[in-house]
Image (spheres, rainbow, N blue to C red):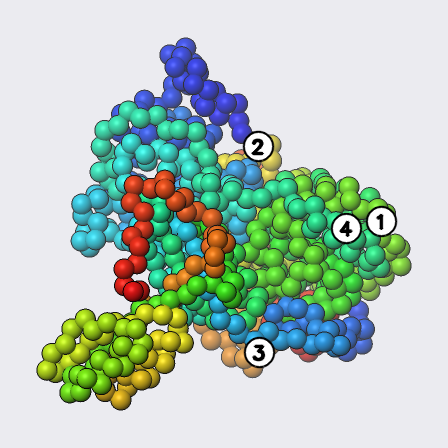
Amino acid sequence: MSDNRTGLQGPAPDERPHPDGRRNAQGIRIDPEAESEHEPRRTVFSAIVEDEPGVLSRVAGLAARRQFNIESLTVGPTTVDGHSRITMVVEEPEPGIDQIEKQLAKLKPVISVGELDDDAVRAELVLLKVRGEDPDKVHAITEMYDGRTLDAGPETITVQLSGDERKIDDAVDAFRRFGIIEIARTGQTALAHGSKKTVPGEEPGTSGEPTKPNTNTK
Amino acid sequence: MSERTAATTDPDATDGADDSTETPTEITSGSTSVVRALENAGVETAFGVQGGAIMPIYDALYHSDIRHVTMAHEQGAAHAADAYGVVRGDPGVCLATSGPGATNLVTGIADANMDSDAVLALTGQVPSDMVGSDAFQETDTTGVTAPITKHNYFASSPDTVGDTVGEAFALAAEGRPGPTLVDLPKDVSLNETDREPGPAQAPETCRARTDPADSQVEAAARAIERAEKPLLLFGGGVVKADATEVARRFATEHRIPVVTTMPGIGAMPEDHELCLSWAGMHGTGYANMAITHTDCLIAVGTRFDDRLTGGIDTFAPEAEIVHIDIDPAEISKNVHADYPVVGDAGRAIERVDAELGESPDAREWVEQCLTWKEEYPMDYAAPDNEPLKPQFVVEALDEATPDETIVTSGVGQHQMWAAQYWTFTEPRRWVSSHGLGTMGYGLPAAIGARVAAADDETVVCVDGDASFLMTIQELSVAVRENLDITVAILNNEYIGMVRQWQDAFFEGRRMAAGYDWCPQFDKLAEAFGARGWTVDSYEEVPGAIEEALAYDGPSVIDFHVDPAENVYPMVSSGGANGKFALSEDQL
C-alpha cells in the first residue's frame, strides 16, 4: 500500500469541548434549578384481556423480563364472555410505571389497560389459619375486622377477612398473638370510584354470564 | 404488494381459477388452508427445513407456486427470511419442524425482534393430544418464543388456522414490524377443512396509530423552530416506514444535519454534505460530536440503544429531544422525550414539516458540523511494512461494485469496518444484525437478500472468519440455488472484537480469541462447489474482487488481513460519545 493514509486524526478526548449538561438515570435532563429523582411509587393497573391460553404467562413474563416489580396480580372473569380483568399492583419509579402500561398495551391479548386513580375502590381477601387454643378471643378479633370464621376445630381456626390493604395488614398483625400457622392472601383487586369507567372493555348486559355479585362482603 | 396478491385476494379470480395461469391451492385440510393464507398475503418465497411435524405444510407447498428455499439449518432459514424482508419491505417467511427445528429458529427470531424486522415463522408441533406429554421432538415453542415475538399463536383448529396465519403475517408488518410465529400441531395441519381463510388483518388490539396528534406535532415544531443546533437522528424506523424520501427532503429543505443509527444507514446518502454518518460506539467522530453538542435532537424511528447513546448521563446532554416513533413504548424508555410524536415516521415528518413556521436558523451549527467532519476524518493508516488492512478491502469492494449493492455482514470488527468504510447511499442496502449482534448472520442473510433482490443487483457479504464459520453450511444452499453472492472474509484469525477488548480492557489476555485453527476457506468454498480465492497482499485485492464479482455464482474471497488492526473511533461502554477514543491509549 502506501503511507499516504494517515489514520484517524483530530483533537484527543481531553482537548475537545464538552458540554456541562447531564441526564439522570431515567434519561431526563437534569435541571440544576430543580433536580428531581423519581421515588418508587405504588400503584394499581387494571387491564381487560382476551381470555386465551397463556395470557397470564404473557403478562407475568413481560413483567419478569423487563424487571417490573409486581406486588400482586389477580385475574377473573368480567361481564363479557371471553374477557378477563387483570388487576396488578406495582411499585416503580415514574418512567417505569409509564413503561409498564405501554408494554402491557402492546401485548396482543390486552384489550385495554389503565392506571387507577388514588380514589379507586380496592379490596383483597385473606384466609388466616391460627391456633385454636383461644376461640373466644379469635372470634372477637374476627368480628372486629368484619371477618367470618370458615373452619374451627380444637387445633386450628381459619378465618376470612376482606378489605383494603391497610385493614388486612392491621388484621394480620392483630392475629399474630394467636400464632398464625398459615396465610393466603389474594392480592388487591380494584375498580374506579363511582361511575368512572376503570378501563374500557366491559359491556354490562351483553354477556350471558355477568360477574356474580360478591356475597362475601356482608 | 405484488399483482399476484391482487389476483389471489379477488374472490372472482379464485372462483375463476381454472382460467388463470396460476392455480391457487385447493383447500382440503389445515395445511392447504395455511398455504392459501400465505398465497393470499402475497408470499412468494419461504425459507425452511423439513421435518416430521411440519411435513403436512410442506406437502401443501408441493402444490403451490410459492418458492421454497431449503436451508441447511433453521437458524439460516430465520436469518434468510429476515434479510429477505429487509430488502423487500414485507415480511419474510420461514418454516421449521417441532422441537429442535423450532429451537434452531430462536436465534433468528430473537434477531428479528431486536431489529424490528417483520418475519413470520411457521413451526410444526406434535399432535394436539400429545402436547404436554414430552413427545418426540416436542418443545413448548410458543412458550420459548413468547419473549422474542410480537405475538405467537398456537393453532387449534383446521377451520381457523388459515385465518391465524393471515393474522400473524399482517401483525408482523403492522406498526413497528417484528416477528410473529404460528405453532401448527400436526393434526391441525392434517385434518380436513374446506374453509377459505378470510382477509388477513392485524388484530384489533394491535393496530398502530399512524397519524400523530395535533398537539404533539405543534409542540415538536415549536421546539425545532427555536433550535440553534438542531440535529436529525434517523433510525431504522425511517427505513422500515419507507420514509427515506420524506426524511431527506426535510433535512435538506431546512438545512438540518443528519446522523443515523446503524439500522438507519442509508436513510440519508452518506456522501451528502449534511450527512454525518452513524453515531455511537464505533460511529464517526463528527456524528458523536454533533450528538453531544446539539440543542435539539430530532430522533425518528430509533429506540436509543446503549451502543448509540453510550452512558445515558452524557447522551445529548444539552438537547431537548423530539422523538418520533410509531411505538409509544419507546417514548421515554431509555431517554426522556421532551416532545414525543407517536405515529408513522413519514407521516409524522410531513406533519411536523407542514407545521414549521420557518426553518431553524442553524447556519453556524451546520458550519460547525462540517468543521468536525474535516477535523475528525474517517481514515486508517496503511504502512507498507504492515499486512493488508481490512478497511482497504471494504473500500475496494465498494469501489468495484455498483452504488446500490446490498451488503450483509456478520458481527464483530468486520461489521464495523464495513459500516464505516462502505459509503451507503440508499436504504435497504445495509443488512446486518444490530440489536442482537448475531455472529453468523451474514451468509444466510446474503442468501435471503439475493433471493429478494433483482437479478441485476449485486449482493456482497462482508464477513469475519469466526462469524463465517458459524453458519458456513449455508454455502451449500447458495451453491444448490446458484445464487450470485460474493463473500469477502476479513480474516484476522481472531474473534477480533473480543481480541481488541482483551487488549484494551483485560491486559492482553487473549483467552479463547485465537482462530488460527480456521480451515482454508478458499478450499472449503471449492469443496462446497463455490469458487474460492485467498488474498494476502494489496496487489492481489483488485484482481480477486474482479474475478469473484464476475463469477455468476457463490464466491468466497479469504482476505488475510492485519490481525492487529483495531476498530476506532470507539466510545467505551457506558462512556460519553463526545469522548470517543481515536486509539487504544485514549480509552
Nearer the camera: disc 4 or disc 3 = 4
Marks 2/1 same chain: yes
Closer to us: A166 or A26: A166
- Residue picked out by circle 2: B454
- Gap between marks 3 and 1 measured at Cα: 45 Å
Left or right placement of residue B516 versus residue B585 in this view: left
Q: Are marks 4 and 1 in contact (CB under 8 Å)?
A: no
* Residue at screen point 41% across, 51% down: A48
- Residue A78 picture location, percent across and down: 35, 50
User: What secondary structure is marked by label 2?
Assistant: loop
- Occupied quadrant, residue B550: top right
Q: CA distance from mark 4 to mark 3?
A: 44 Å
> Which residue matches tag 3?
B505
- Taking the spot 35% from the left edge, 75% from the top edge, the residue there is A168
* Residue wearing tag 1: B359
Q: Which residue is mark 4?
A: B221
Amino acid residing under circle 4: Ala
Coordinates of residue A169 in the picture (x, y in percent): 36, 78
- Reply above or below: B578 against B217: below
Q: CA distance from mark 2 to mark 3?
A: 45 Å
First of labels 2, 4 by sequence position: 4
Q: CA distance from mark 4 to mark 1?
A: 10 Å
